[in-house]
Amino acid sequence: KRAAALSNEFISLRFACPAVVSHAVSFGAVIGAILRGKPVNPSLGFGLYGLAKKGVLPFGTSLSPEEIAAGKQARVTDLPEPDALLQAAFVLTGAQKQDLVSAPAHVAAPM
């Protein structure tokens, strides 16, 4: 019983933040797309993001200035905008660049 209570407390604390939940759902959506046979390429995340904009995936979305001018309404949900869906595209794009150079963490600019 104690293990179950501790586990429940951990899950409640971890997933109390909508951003954490959004990233977890985004990860699941990316894995689900791969398991459904979608190719692992930079367009994967952009395709999933398009599904979020259409309301197929349970994320809120913001609008471009053009969409606002056209009178489109933003989707409001419990999950924030799914930027994590795009992470796969950014990582894959970076990995494919032969000339990409990344400085070691200890050399990065201080915050």
Image: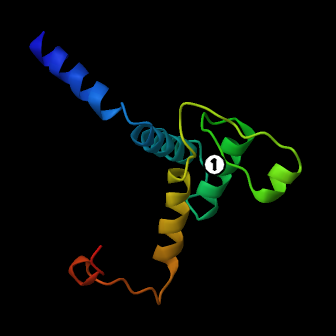
Q: Is residue 58 left or right of residue 111?
A: right
Query: What residue did someone put label 1 on?
Result: 48
> Dot 1, crowdedness within 10 Å: few (<14), some or many (≥20)?
many
Q: Position of residue 78 (x, y in %)?
A: 54, 30
* Above or below: residue 45 compared with residue 99: above
Q: Residue shown at 54%/48% (left/top)?
A: 34
Q: Residue at x 54, y 53 (%)?
A: 83
Q: How many marks?
A: 1
Report the amino acid beneath label 1: Leu
Judged from the image, the secondary structure of the residue bearing numbered disc 1 is: helix
Q: How is the image coloured?
A: rainbow
Q: Is residue 4 left or right of residue 19?
A: left
Measuring from the top left, give residue 67's x and y in whole percent.
82, 52
Q: Is residue 79 above or below residue 91?
A: above
Q: Which residue does the image show at 83% across and 57% down from the upper left?
A: 66
Can you give x and y, in whole percent of width and height, for residue 19 in the image?
44, 42
Which residue does the image show at 49% across and 75% down from the upper left? 94
Nearer-the-camera pick, 56 or 19: 19
The quarter of the picture where residue 18 lies is top left
